[in-house]
């Protein structure tokens, strides 16, 4: 049985220190905490107070820092694991791992639940010119080759495949460069979009990162080479036992779909990244931001009038408040597909403004038609529901200051206060006295008529404290009986007859008025004509000049004066 | 001592105020946020830009509402009297060439060395395409009528 002990995971990856410590001094008396490395071997990986872990074989009583490998279970006997320390370039596709491996020395203690998670294959790439073989990279950044036909996997490739693998590396280097180039171009295009794209591309990478942070690899004894750590490359040539290897291939099929998705997501790592891809990606981003294709300079075949109608339709459907601003409504509008019915935001704004104007006009018309209710009615209803003699007005006011009825600016505070005080004082009296009060009051009211109903009482009644102070059923019965007791008016009868009568009377009045008006007009005209005739006569007389000249006009007055003096 | 007018005691606003009340409240909250926003790392002028911007937006909203007949003349006057909008700025908007004016500071020629207006008043067509304008007074990116 093999046991793996890791008391201090910080030092777990320190090959230098491991080699410096004398073995015998570290011989443990009893392993405090142990885990099986693999099911069959008899090595223990134990530790001492110094915190270094090593392997201890219970039967042969030997200890070693390097991970012991049972020759019977070693899957790759042909190629010694030391070879893996050199070809670090296998990892160049995963730059985030360089970064991570550097960080590894300062990592916080790892979570124990993740400790025994085995290494898993992550990506699989076919090796060109060596058809059955595939190049597999594991989550820990290790690489091996695998033949799916014979189910054979090797840590180190045979000589015949090495050239093919090198060409694969070269290919991926080119891809890397290509990706860099595209990224630079995109950054020139739009910085924000590039960020978005990188977020997508890195999403998978971040996921990997997290995995590794808490991941304790099962094997790591062979990285005795300090260079590997210096270069920041994490390459543990862990040698899975046969039992685990079976799992590997089951998992590989399972992971295949995931791998393909990852290939697509990474967009450039392994798949050729073409102009079409960029266009598709930009389109995708545009769709996310609610920018139509039209915004990017492409025309739409929709007629402009239809676009306007569609956009107005959208505004109607979303119940947009015509009294709000474009900026506040924009987020809601942009989500809808019809937002792109108009090509430019300028046009959209204009249509929005027009629509608001129309809507406001229609709302105004509706309001004119509506019957206006007294603002006090709502407050009185509120009082009825909430007022108690226990609360003084200031207390009541403070308690309900957030209520809409208490904030309504149409009713002043003074009015509110008087109503409240009245109401409370009335509530304290008996119901009978209040009933009598109401009956007395109703007799003085002149607005009430035989035809009026309880639903639309005149505001003078509805807002009177004597009416409000009674409970609902009592006051309604009283008002109803009062209305029934009212004498029948002249306008008694059905409302239709009433209306007809009113109409007839109005017509008669109007006719009389018109007749009078006409009479006055005629009189005016006659008077005017008379005046005109008189002036004409005068002028004629004036024009009638005889031989005596102007004296003829003067003489008669003289004669008259003489006659007058004689008389006096 | 003049009487203290609180919100509850003041004369009720004219009809139609309820319609625009929510939007005005939004502007008020925005303004409060802008006033209390941290200013570390900002230039001295930069701190005032959001204030100018919100004030401009609110004046524009009220003026637009008045033009669209969303609010009555009575209410419009009341709003101006109660300082919901800047009447002097609105007065400028009525003049030809000043339809989009950002703030009054930007046309104050006496404050400049050469008796000129702010850079944001220069039409885009007169400048090279690469020039990015951000005026010092209010952070305006250009408010010429022809833009």
Image (spheres, grey):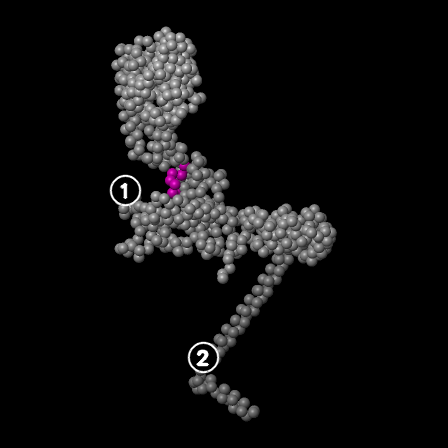
Q: Are marks 2 and 1 in contact (CB under 8 Å)?
A: no
Which range is magenta? A340-347
Does the magenta segment cover residue A104? no
Residue B111, relative to residue B128: is it above or below? below
Q: Residue at x 29, y 28 (%)?
A: A180
Q: Residue at x 33, y 29 (%)?
A: A278
Give x and y (percent) for residue B48.
37, 49
Q: Quadrant of the N terminus of chain A?
A: top left
* Apparent side of residue A504 relative to residue A409 in the rendered image (left or right): right
Give x and y (percent) for residue B38.
39, 44
> Which chain does the numbered disc 2 sit on?
A
* Residue located beneath label 1 in the image: B130
Q: Residue at x 70, y 54 (%)?
A: A438
**Residue in front for this viewpoint, A179 or A427:** A427
Give x and y (percent) for residue A9.
38, 22
Q: Main secondary structure of the magenta part?
A: helix
């Amino acid at each position: 049985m093999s046991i793996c002990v890791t008391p201090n995971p910080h030092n777990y990856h320190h090959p230098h220190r491991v080699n410096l410590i004398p073995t015998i001094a570290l011989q443990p008396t009893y392993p405090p905490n142990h885990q099986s490395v693999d099911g069959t071997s008899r090595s223990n990986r134990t530790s001492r107070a110094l915190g270094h872990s090593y392997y201890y074989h219970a039967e042969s009583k030997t200890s070693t820092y390097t991970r012991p490998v049972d020759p019977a279970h070693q899957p790759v006997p042909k190629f010694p694991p030391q070879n893996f320390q050199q070809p670090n370039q296998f990892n160049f596709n995963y730059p985030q791992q360089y970064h991570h491996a550097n960080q590894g020395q300062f990592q916080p203690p790892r979570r124990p639940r993740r400790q025994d998670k085995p290494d898993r294959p992550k990506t699989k790439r076919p090796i060109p010119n060596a058809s059955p073989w595939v190049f597999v990279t594991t989550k820990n950044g290790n690489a091996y080759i695998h033949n799916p036909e014979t189910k054979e996997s090797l840590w180190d490739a045979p000589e015949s495949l090495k050239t093919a693998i090198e060409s694969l590396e070269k290919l991926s280097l080119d891809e890397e460069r290509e990706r860099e180039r595209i990224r630079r171009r995109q950054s020139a295009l739009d910085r924000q979009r590039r960020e978005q794209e990188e977020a997508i591309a890195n999403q998978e990478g971040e996921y990997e990162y997290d995995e590794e942070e808490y991941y304790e690899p099962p094997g790591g004894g062979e990285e005795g080479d300090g260079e590997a750590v210096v270069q920041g490359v994490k390459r543990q040539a862990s040698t899975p036992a046969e039992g685990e290897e079976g799992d590997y291939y089951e998992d590989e099929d399972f992971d295949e779909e995931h791998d393909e998705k990852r290939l697509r997501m990474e967009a450039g790592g392994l798949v050729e990244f073409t102009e079409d891809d960029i266009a598709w990606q930009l389109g995708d981003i545009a769709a996310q931001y609610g920018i139509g294709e039209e915004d990017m300079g492409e025309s739409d075949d929709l007629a402009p009038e239809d676009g306007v109608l569609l956009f107005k339709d959208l505004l109607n459907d979303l119940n947009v408040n015509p009294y709000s601003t474009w900026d506040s409504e924009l987020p809601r509008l942009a989500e809808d597909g019809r937002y792109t019915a108009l090509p430019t935001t300028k046009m959209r704004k204009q249509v929005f403004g027009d629509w608001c104007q129309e809507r406001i006009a229609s709302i105004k018309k509706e309001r004119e038609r509506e019957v206006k209710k007294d603002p006090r009615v709502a407050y009185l209803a509120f009082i009825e529901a909430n007022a108690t003699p226990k609360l003084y007005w200031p207390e009541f006011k403070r308690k309900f200051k957030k209520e809409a009825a208490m904030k309504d600016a149409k009713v002043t505070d003074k009015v509110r206060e008087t109503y409240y005080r009245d109401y409370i004082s009335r509530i304290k009296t008996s119901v009978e006295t209040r009933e009598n009060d109401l009956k007395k009051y109703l007799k003085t009211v002149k607005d009430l008529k035989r035809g009026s109903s309880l639903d639309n009482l005149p505001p003078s009644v509805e807002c009177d404290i004597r009416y409000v102070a009674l409970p609902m059923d009592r006051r309604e019965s009283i008002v109803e009986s009062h209305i029934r007791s009212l004498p029948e008016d002249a306008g008694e009868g059905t409302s239709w007859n009433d209306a007809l009568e009113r109409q007839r009377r109005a017509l008669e009045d109007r006719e009389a008025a018109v007749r009078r008006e006409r009479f006055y007009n005629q009189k005016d005209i006659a008077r005017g004509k008379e005046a005109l005739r008189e002036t004409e006569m005068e002028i004629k007389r004036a024009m009638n000049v005889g031989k005596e000249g102007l004296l003829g006009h003067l003489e008669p007055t003289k004669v008259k004066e003489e006659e007058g003096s004689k008389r006096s | 001592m003049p009487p203290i007018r609180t919100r509850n005691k003041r004369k009720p606003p004219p009809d139609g105020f309820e319609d625009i009340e929510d939007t005005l409240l939004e502007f008020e909250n925005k303004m409060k946020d802008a006033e209390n926003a941290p200013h570390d790392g900002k230039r001295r002028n930069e701190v005032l830009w959001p204030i100018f911007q919100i004030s401009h937006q609110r004046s524009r909203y009220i003026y637009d509402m008045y033009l669209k007949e969303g609010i009555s003349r009575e209410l419009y006057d009341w709003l101006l009297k109660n300082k919901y909008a800047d009447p002097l700025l609105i007065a400028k908007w009525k003049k030809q060439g000043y339809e989009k004016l950002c703030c009054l500071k930007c046309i104050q020629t006496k404050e400049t060395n050469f008796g000129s207006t702010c850079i944001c008043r220069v039409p885009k067509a007169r400048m090279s395409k690469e020039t990015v304008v951000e005026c010092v007074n209010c952070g305006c990116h250009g408010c010429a009528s022809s833009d």
